[in-house]
């Protein structure tokens, strides 16, 4: 078994099956929906203790954020109760983003 966070060409990968997350390109492959993934914005108790609780989404502009992908252009945030109230947030890189990305990449 091989675990990878990279998009590979299925036909040339010599694999019998793949589990992928997100929308798939038009394909002649057969697919089956296994479930739904919810993406959440979270903070550790230590972070909240040292930096304080964010009062509103706009406070993210000043927060230290660990991003999972430095190429992510923006996040779209919305209230569950009111999907018309949306905020687009562009994460800034923290001083640790390169180290975190390298660490994440080394596990692929």
Image (cartoon, rainbow, N blue to C red):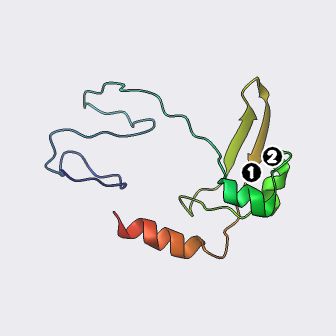
Q: Secondary structure at mark 1?
A: strand
Q: Measuring 76% from the left and 23% from the top, which residue is drawn there? A: 81
The picture places residue 70, in percent across and down from the top left corner, at 57, 64
Which numbered marker is on residue 57?
2
Marks 2 and 1: in contact by CB < 8 Å? yes
**Residue 7 image offset from top left, x and y in percent:** 35, 52
* Towards the viewer: 1 or 69: 1
Give the position of the C terminus as an image quadrant: bottom left
Q: Tell me which residue sits at (55%, 34%) in the image.
A: 38
Give the vertical position of 105 relative to 59 (above or below). Answer: below
In this rendering, the answer to whether 76 lies above or below 100 is: above
Q: Residues within 10 Å of mark 1 (few under 14, many from 20)?
A: some
**Splitting the image into 4 quarters, where does residue 71 fall?**
bottom right
**Residue carrying label 1:** 89
Q: Residue at x 47, y 28 (%)?
A: 36
Query: Which of these two is toward me, 12 or 81?
Result: 81
Specify few, some or many for label 2: CA neighbours under 10 Å numbering under 14, 14-19, or 20 or more: few
């Amino acid at each position: 078994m091989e675990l990878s966070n990279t998009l590979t060409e299925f036909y040339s990968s010599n694999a019998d099956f793949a589990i992928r997350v997100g929308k798939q390109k038009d394909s002649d492959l057969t697919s089956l929906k296994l479930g739904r993934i919810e993406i959440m914005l979270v903070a550790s108790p230590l972070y909240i203790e040292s930096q304080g609780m964010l009062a509103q989404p706009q406070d993210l502009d000043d927060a230290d954020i660990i991003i999972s992908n430095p190429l992510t252009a923006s996040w779209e945030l919305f209230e569950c109760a009111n999907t018309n109230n949306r905020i687009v947030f562009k994460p800034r890189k923290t001083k640790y983003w390169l180290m975190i990305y390298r660490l994440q990449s080394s596990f692929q």
